[in-house]
Every structure is written in structure tokens, then in C-alpha cells.
Image (tube, coloured by chain):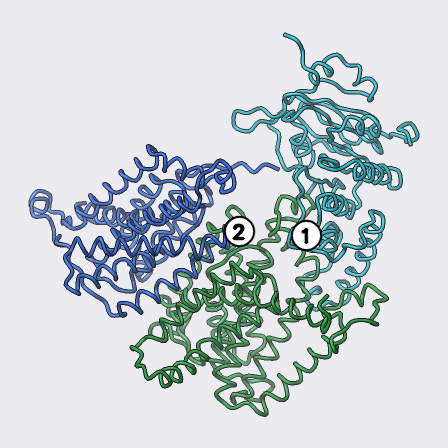
Amino acid sequence: MTATTRRAGDVILKLDNISLSFGGVKALTDISFDVREHEVRAIIGPNGAGKSSMLNVINGVYHPQAGTITFRGEVRRDMNPHRAAASGIARTFQNIALFRGMSVLDNIMTGRNLKMKAHFLEQAIWFGRARREELEHRAKVEEIIDFLEIQHIRKTPVGRLPYGLQKRVELARALAAEPSMLLLDEPMAGMNVEEKQDMCRFVLDVNEQYGTTIVLIEHDMGVVMDISDRVVVLDYGKKIGDGTPDEVRSNKTVIDAYLGVAH
Amino acid sequence: MSFFFEVLIGGLLSGVMYSLVALGFVLIYKASGVFNFAQGAMVFFAALTFVGFLEMGVWFWFAFALTLGAMVVLGLATERIVLRPLVNQPQISLFMATIGLTFVLEGLAQLLWGSQPHGLDIGIQDEPLGWISDATGMNISKFDLAAAGIAAALVTSLALFFSRTRIGRALRAVADDHQAALAVGIPLQQIWGIVWTVAGFVALVAGMLWGARNGVQFALTFLALKALPVLILGGFESIPGAIVGGLIIGASEKLAEVYLGPYVGGGIEGWFPYVLALLFLLVRPEGLFGEKHIDRV
Amino acid sequence: MLYREAGQFKASYAEDQQIFAIRQDRIAVGALLVFAFVVVPLVANQYWLSAILTPLLIFALAAIGLNILTGYAGQLSLGTAAFMAVGAFAAYNFVLRVPGIPILVAFVLAGICAALVGILFGLPSLRIKGFYLAVATLAAQFFVVWALTKFGWFSNNSSSGVISAQKIEILGYTVDTPAGKYLFTLTIVAVLALAAKNLVRSSTGRAWMAVRDMDVAASVIGIRLMQTKLSAFAISSAYCGVAGALYAFAYLGTVEPEGFNLDMSFRVLFMVIIGGVGSILGSFLGAAFIVLLPIFLNTAAPLIEHGLGLQMPPGFMSNLELIVFGALIVFFLAVEPHGLARLWQIGKEKLRLWPFPH
């Protein structure tokens, strides 16, 4: 499975001159890059480089002070989480953000909430559209459960699951929304080699089967270079590199940032 | 105009007394992250115990020491029985546990000392200061002034205690993160014990002052409810906030009662502070002196 | 050995999504409903019906209301009694001022009024969380009681706001016996409890729980925080409002605003904590526990007194009650945060395996 077998389409997400700061602390400075449809786009960089902030800007959790975000032709100053979700952007978090009080099944079902249209009064009497929707969406969720091979834990409260499985459930919840773009924040952090291989396989399968565009933050360079089509490199909130894995690998500034420069 | 100032000053002085109760909340919150709803019940418990000893014929300062001892025991028992089993539980559970504690303290106090109201005389009269009346025509209570003085002294010493001592520093570390504090070797239980003892002391002082003013009775527990809007205004973690919040609430509630009350039928003291605090929250959710938290995702 | 689900296979998601997925549970619930609707009115005496069972059901409904807000949506409220008061006074005024209005319509409208007040006092939840919000709900508690007392219109100008609820009439038939009022209450509570169960297992309920467990993640999924929190406030308050209307119409008959005080709010909160946070069944268990405990204490006390030859001081029981309630709250929070509902569940799991240990 190599990157060349996939077809990258048009640019669907374009970030122009994004700057973000908290109080006096600059998290992102004047960053521009784009994401093409169906591609796997990685964001890498040392700790504190602003990678997670970048994802938070894309799906509207943070609002940048400057710059524009263009998603599917619509130019905006910033996103908000609901609009991002409604236009097909889903994500996972670096520190697992599952709903700890709910079962695996309910967590994933929540991922489909946006698609449920029944009025709460219909839901209260569990009749007609409400009942039909529950069943339809349950069937869809079961497909995702099969796909990610988590059938055996579907009724388990997520709090009781080991770390690796929690990460997988979080991916399942994101997939449940049938997103056209998936933002993954360190999906393989803290996993052993086997779990990483599983996760890689799932990510690539999602990309190939559903054509989902993937924006991925990852520290494991082996993984990044293997599965991504193009890579953005951030350091101290600035973009220092952008291109195919090979281009980035040979970029002088990037090498300096990672290995340190002799002053 | 002189009437306005009289109301204002009366309000400010009773505000100082609110601050005193709010101070107990802030202390415990700062040190243990627990929002101690039982502070009002502690005031009631302390006042009732103190009066109980006095009426048994115990000498004033001895009764004071005995009550303080009782509050220490109570604080340590609370730490042992209520807080320790709830370490690392969500704050809201701890809050609800202190509501439970409120009920226990109220029941216990009345079981021990009976439920009839008592008078309390601590030797300061609640009468207008003659020379101020003569000079300005305003009636300012001697008692209120003395109470404000005591409260100010207490607040200053606590502020110093918090900022200048090793225990104070440990307290702040514990407030920030229980587990991290444990990890660097701060004895959590001991710190909590100290804090509840200090809070018990503050409750005793507040109970004596309020009890001397309005009588020692069940209504003292409602003081906690008066202190809550003060906390919202001032922020849960700020001693200066508790003081300023108390002054604002005290003054505005009296002014509102006098100038606004007649238009809506009076009795608005009960809810006015809450609505004021609520409106304030909408503008500044972290309170006057609270720290703004940035949620990291 | 009776409680086994072996051999019961679920062939469709519909079967798997039933409220009671195990056959024995369905039979037990059916039996319980028959018992409550048929046997109890026939055999229970007047004291049990009007002084214990009716208020128990009413408080269970209020506890469901609070559980929706606190247990499912994670927004702590100390103003439950205020929303009950709104319901009681709204129902009274609808019946008083709208000639010929059917009682159930008045109850529905009362629920809607409480929902509107709930939304109003829920607005701060958009900016604040946790006990800041709890303190904000106290504003509702004090303000509502004050307004109902001060403005004569609400109580048709009776002194200190006392109202006497009108007769309950359904299709020309007057419900005035204890058994009738009990059945009236039971029907409403059963229907609303089922509706609440349906809500919490559908997308509305999942949105509530998502906001409770992690609001940032919820918003990223596309859940609107404002809408979700306010809907929890609205529906919760509507439940409390109907409970309040029943409290006036089917239980006490005569109520005053002061009756819906902070103490009552705490009582309902205790029901939720002891019964089980985030459980509809727990709301019933908690209400039963809190309603029955004082009765139990008061029955047991004279026996103990007599047995030991002691003379208890006056007010002893009420103070002991306070201590026991408070201690139980601390106990449940520390030892079993999911309350009686969880104990019940554990018991059922044990029963499934019985007589084998594993």
C-alpha cells in the first residue's frame, strides 16, 4: 500500500495567513497551507509547535486573530464547532475525549446525532420517525463497529477500556458522522507496535474505502512518512516546511529543527 | 443625603460580616478545592456551642477555647470521614457531600444544645456612636464598627498567613492540584486538617459576632446563603474578593431594600444579591478577582 | 435459577434496544404495574394512599426532573422546589381563570410555564459551570418564592400566597377519594417516566450526557451546547412543574409558596443522589427511600424508647432525621455514587449467575 495508488483531488481546505495567540503567547504565526480532497495530510513538528492549535482552528474550537479559512469554496474568518461538524469535519483528540459515563455504543451513536431529525416529543413517545431513526442509525453504527473490530466491547462503559481501545472508539465516533474530512490528533500516541499497525491500517482503509480526506498529527516519523501524501512542518508556531515526505525529509530547516543546530 | 449615607454605611458594615462568613468558604476552597456549603452550619454550630458553655457558667475565654477545641475536632473529623473517602472525586460530588455535612451539623448542634434561640452578650453594645451622631446626624452602630474592626484584623492576619508561611505555600499547592501536591511530598491530610481548623476558627468568630447581634438561632445557618453571592462576585479563590464582594453585596442589598423595595412590595433582600451576582456572572464569569482559566483542548 | 437470559437471542436491533431486554424483567415490570394500578387501590388504606404513596410518586416525578438536569445533562440545580412552585401556581391559575379548561390541559400548560421559567434561569449555564451554576439556581429558588408571595395575582389575592387547589375533574367525574387521587398521580407519573426513559435513550439524551461528560468533544461532534443545556433545563423544569401541580392538586390541596422552600429542593436532590445519579429507576428508589425513612424512624423510635426505658428529648427525632439524611448523602457519595439504582443492578447481575459464584 503506497501513497501513489491514491488520487488526490482538488483543494478543499485552504488556510491563509492564520495567526493565533492566547493573551501574549503566540501559538500560530502567519500560517498558510492547503489540503486536497482524498489525500492524507500530516502535520508534524516538535512539542509545542502549534499542531493541535492548528486542528482546533480548522474545526472552530479556537478562533484565530488573523487569516482566513476556506472550506469547500466558502471563505471565513473563523469556524465554529457546529458549522465544522455540519459541513463534514470530524476529529479525534490528543487526550482521549470520550464521554466517560456512556457505553461504547452510545458514544458512537452520539457521533450520528447531527443526522437525527426526530423531534424530542417524537422521541419521548418512541414512535414513528424517532424509532425508525434509532434503528437505522444503529445499523450504520454497527457497520462501523464491525469495521473497527470492536464488536465485543459495544456495551462496555468506555471508562473501563484500555487506552488503545479507547482511541479506537474515539475514531469510531468520528467516523460515525461519515465525515468528508477527518482530523486525527496523534491517533497512535502511547500505543505499542501492534496497536500502531492496526491503527495505520484503519486510517488507510477509511481513506481508501470512503475517500475521506485525512489531516493527521503524529510523532512517529516512520508512520508519517509511510502513510501521508504531503506533510506540513511547524516549529514554534511557524511553518518551516511543506511538501511530499521526501521533500520534507531533505529540507534543511526541518532537519535543523528536529536535530538541533549548532550555534 | 445623610440618610443615604447612613444606609450605605450600615450596609457596608453588615457587608463586612458577610465577608467574614465568605472568608471561611474561600479558605477551604483555596486549600482543598472544596466548595464547603456547610460553612453556615459551622457558624451555627460554633455559636450554639459557645453559648451553651457560657450558659453553663464557663468563663468567657475558657468557653472560647473549648469551642475552638470542638471546632478543631469537628474539622479533623470532617477531613477524616467526609473528605478523605472523596479524594479525586469531581468537585461537584464534594460540594454535595458538604450539603450532607450541613444537615449533620445542624442536627448535631440542636441535638446537643437544644433548638431554642439564645441571647449572646460579648460586651459590645449595639447602639449608635454618640459623637458621630452629634457631628453628622448619622447613626452608626458601635457594634458594627467593632465587628468590622475584628473582621479586618482577622482577614489581614489570614492573608499574611497564606502568603508568608510555609504552610500557606503548601496550601496553595494543594489547591492547585491534589495529586501533584502529594507527589512532591506535601502531607495532604495534615494540610486539610489545618485548613478546616482555621475555617472553624473563622466560623466561631463569625458566629459570636452574628450571634451577639441577632441572637444565636437556627437562622444563623442561612448566613451561608448570604455569603454565596459574595463569593460569586469576588471569585471563590480570592480573599480580597471576599472582602470587596461582601461590601458590595452588603451595601447594595440595603440600598435596594430602601430605595427599590417600596416599588415591588419589599422583602427583596432575600434574592436581590443573587440576581445582582447572576447578572455580574454573565459579564465576568470568573468573578472580580478570580483567575481566568483557559481550557486546553 | 429463575433469572436467566440464556436462550433469549436478539435477532434485531429493535429487540436489543428495548427498555427491558430480558424477558423476566418484562414480566416483573408488567406484574408491578398491575399491582400498582389494581391491587394497591383495592387493599391499601387511606393513610398509605394519601400520606405515603401519592407523595412518593410525586417526589419520584420531581426527582426524574432533577435527574434529567443534574444526572443526565450534568447541570447541578438547587432550585427544584421553585420550578415545582411555578407548576403548582400555574395550574391553579389556569383552572381558575380559564373556564372549563380540562385539568390535564392545565397541567400541560403548567409544565410549559415551568419550562419557560427553567429556560430563563438556565441561561447562566451558558457561561458558568459547576457550583457557580448551583448558586445561580438558588436565585431561582429565592426569587420565585418571593414573587409568588408578593404578587397577589398569583394566588388570587389570598393572604401570604396560600392557594387551595381546585377539584380534579376528568370528563365530568370528580376525583376526590384517596384511591382516585393516587390513580390519577400514578397514571401521570408512569406515562412521564416512560417518556423520560425514551428521551434519555434517544439522541436528545445522548446529547445531554455528551455535554455532561465532555462539552468540548460534544460541540466538535456538532452538538449545540446552548440548545442542549437549555432543553435540559426546559424539560427538567417541566417535569418538576407537573410534579408541583400534582403536589398541590392530588396531595396537599392547600399550598403556599413558602412550602416550596430550599429544604424541599434539597430533599429532591437527596433523592437523586441516594437513588442514583443518571437513572430513571433510581429516581423512584430515591424518592421511596427519602419518603419512607422518616416514617420508619418515627415508627421505630417509640419501640426503642420503650424497650430501653429512655425518654427522648423533644425535637430529638427531627434532629436525628437531619443527621441520618446528611450522613447517608456523604455515605452514598463516597461509597456508591450511582446510588440504589447501581446496587439494584449489581443485585441483578448476581442473580443472573446464582447459584454459581462466577
Q: Colour of chain C?
A: green
Mark 1 element type: helix
Position of A178 with respect to B240 (left or right) is right
Quadrant location, the C terminus of chain A: top right
Given residues C356 and A256, the one toward you in this image is C356
Residue A139 in percent (x, y) is at: 83, 57
Mark 1 near mark 2, Cβ–Cβ under 8 Å? no
Q: Which residue is mark 1?
A: A160
Q: Colour of chain B?
A: blue
Relative to C40, is B283 above or below? above
Q: Which residue is mark 2?
A: B89
Residue C306 in percent (x, y) is at: 36, 86
Observer able to see residue C110: no
Label 1 marks a residue whose chain is A
Position of C87 with respect to A204 (left or right) is left
Mark 2 element type: loop
Q: Which chain is cyan?
A: A
Observer able to see residue C116: yes
Please state which amino acid type lies under the numbered disc 2.
Answer: Gln
Marks 1 and 2, how far apart at CA:
17 Å
Label 2 marks a residue whose chain is B
Residue C209 in percent (x, y) is at: 63, 55
Q: Residue furthest top?
A: A263
